[in-house]
């Protein structure tokens, strides 16, 4: 940490000047506390609703340059990882800082494969959900419930224990996700197949019927693996922040990951891919696109799958996904919703409203169309996002737990309510 400059501020209330060190392009909010009007003054706070301009941690995991459309995991461009690394190797990279060597990769895959089964009781409480329960609701609940099977996970500072829970969570996510789907369909649960890849095993647990062994289509298996990689981490987004905040209370990682998955569920975050599909279905045909665009510009609706808090020129994940779509459609046949999506994108990218607001397709705009072509029901889309994001949540959780600067998360507020008043109607 080197001081690269000094911010000089003068408080107009007192005329006093202060020097605040600038470190890595930031001042420390706590340095503002010395700025007071009187000795008993609490000190100046920074006010930042939705943390638009606040760095909440130092992190060596993921780098994003939103203006240039750059995304890197541990320094590697997402484009290279998506093309050349498996999802499990990317998970290893996020968690341990380096890509695994060949033998390490095989050992890591074997370790994950070893933990794909869930306790039989998990099936019992999934059975308790209503037949039309949203699979994301089931997933959030079952991730949290796993903490009751592994009480040793409470020892969050124990590195060996941490490692064990990390492997379990990555390994069991596809199982919980597929079980949630099978429950909704009234199908018997299909158990993990240890001979298959991470993505292949998930496809098997989703679609296997009476055949002795499910053989995933290699193109779809690879496409899904790449989609998981594209979702694997995205620095301090809403769900990752939830993971870190809950983790900061030293809650076990299952509880923290359930909170992260709950944050992901929202339609402005990982639930957006589901909303994109609903929107495309609602638009119905290419002819209706201009009228829909007008509704968006009037502020009646949002164009789901467009816009991003960080990316302001393009989302590199969306570009890669568009390429995957062609490979998938060569196997599954073209999703007719693609024409509506392409027309939406064409008009929007040319329209003053979207250009001036810097709104571009994000990762969710095309992922849903691919998932649907692969046969996933719309409600499973955020679940797929959650499977991919788990390694990122865990890497960020571990980093937070090891960071000596971190404490329990506890923001301040600016109180806007009543002054002192009494039940007898008097004040002050
Ligand atoms: N459609 C229409 N207008 C939009 C949209 C959109 N999708 N997104 C932002 N705007 C407008 C918004 O109305 C506002 O306009 P004005 O300044 O005139 O009031 C301006 O752009 C800034 O919007 P904001 O809500 O302040 O921006 P934000 O950074 O808080 O929100 C966002 C980012 C992703 C939540 C938002 O763009 C959005 O709601 N997009 C649709 C949902 C979506 O696709 N989410 C997935 C994000 S990518 C996956 C992930 O990481 O979760």
Image (cartoon, rainbow, N blue to C red):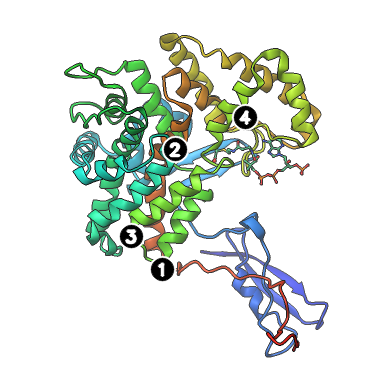
Say which of marks 4 and 1 sits in front. Answer: 4
The mark found on residue 361 in the picture is 4
For the C terminus, give its image quadrant.
bottom right
**Which numbered disc flags the more N-terminal residue, 2 or 1?**
2
Mark 2 packing: few (<14 Cα in 10 Å), some, or many (20+)? Answer: some
From the viewer's perspective, is 285 left or right of 242? right
The disc label shown at residue 36, or none: none
Residue annotated with mark 1: 404
Judged left or right of residue 308, residue 231 is: left
Q: Is mark 3 on a helix, strand or loop?
A: loop
Going from the N terminus, do you reach mark 2 or mark 4 first? 2
Cβ atoms under marks 3 and 1 closer than 8 Å: no
Query: Residue drawn 68% across and 21% down?
Result: 344
Mark 3 vs ligand 1: CB below 8 Å: no
Disc with the residue nearer the chain's start (2 vs 3):
2
Query: Which quarter is ligand 1 in?
Result: top right
Task: Report, in whole angstroms, how far the alpha carbon at label 4 lies from the one at label 1.
Answer: 38 Å
Residue 105 or residue 345, whichever sits in front = 345
Element class at badge 4 = loop
Q: Name the residue under label 2.
A: 134
Q: How far across and down, in percent of the image, does residue 388 sit?
A: 40, 37
* Quadrant position of residue 88: top left
What residue is rendered at 46% in x and 12% in y? 329
Q: Nearer the viewer, mark 2 or mark 4?
A: 2
């Amino acid at each position: 940490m080197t001081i690269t400059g000094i911010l000089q501020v003068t408080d107009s209330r007192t005329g006093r000047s202060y020097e605040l060190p600038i470190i890595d392009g930031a001042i420390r909010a706590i340095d503002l506390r010395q700025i007071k009007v009187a000795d008993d003054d609490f000190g100046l706070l920074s006010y930042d609703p939705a943390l638009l301009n606040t760095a909440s941690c130092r992190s060596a995991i993921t780098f994003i340059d939103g203006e240039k459309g750059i995304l890197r995991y541990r320094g590697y461009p997402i484009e290279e990882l998506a093309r050349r690394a498996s999802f499990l190797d990317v998970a290893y990279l996020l968690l341990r800082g380096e890509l695994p060597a060949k033998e390490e990769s095989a050992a890591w895959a074997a370790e994950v494969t070893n933990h794909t089964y869930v306790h039989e009781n998990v099936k019992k409480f999934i059975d308790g959900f209503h037949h039309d329960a949203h699979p994301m609701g089931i997933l959030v609940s079952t991730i949290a419930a796993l903490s009751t099977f592994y009480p040793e996970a409470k020892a969050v500072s124990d590195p060996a224990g941490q490692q064990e829970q990390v492997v379990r969570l990555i390994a069991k996510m596809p199982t919980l996700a597929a079980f949630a789907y099978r429950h909704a369909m009234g199908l018997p649960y299909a158990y993990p197949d240890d001979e298959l890849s991470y993505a292949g095993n998930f496809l098997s647990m989703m679609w296997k019927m009476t055949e002795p062994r499910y053989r995933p289509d290699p193109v779809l298996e690879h496409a899904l693996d790449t989609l998981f990689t594209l979702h694997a981490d995205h620095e301090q987004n809403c769900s990752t922040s939830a993971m870190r905040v809950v983790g900061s209370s030293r809650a076990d990682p299952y509880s923290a990951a359930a909170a992260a998955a709950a944050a992901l569920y929202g339609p402005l975050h990982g639930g957006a891919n589901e909303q994109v599909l609903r929107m495309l279905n609602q638009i119905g045909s290419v002819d209706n696109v201009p009228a829909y665009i007008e509704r968006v510009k009037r502020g009646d609706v949002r164009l789901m799958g467009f816009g991003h808090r960080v990316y302001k020129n393009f989302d590199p994940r969306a570009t890669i996904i568009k390429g995957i779509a062609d490979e998938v459609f060569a196997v599954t046949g073209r999703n007719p919703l693609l024409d509506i999506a392409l027309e939406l994108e064409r008009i929007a990218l040319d329209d003053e409203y979207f250009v001036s607001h810097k709104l571009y397709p994000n990762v969710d705009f095309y992922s849903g169309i691919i998932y649907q072509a692969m046969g996933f029901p719309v409600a499973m889309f955020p679940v797929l996002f959650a499977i991919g994001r788990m390694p990122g949540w865990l890497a960020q959780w571990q980093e937070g737990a090891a960071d000596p600067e971190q404490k329990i998360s506890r923001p301040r507020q600016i109180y806007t309510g009543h002054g002192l008043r009494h039940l007898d109607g008097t004040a002050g």
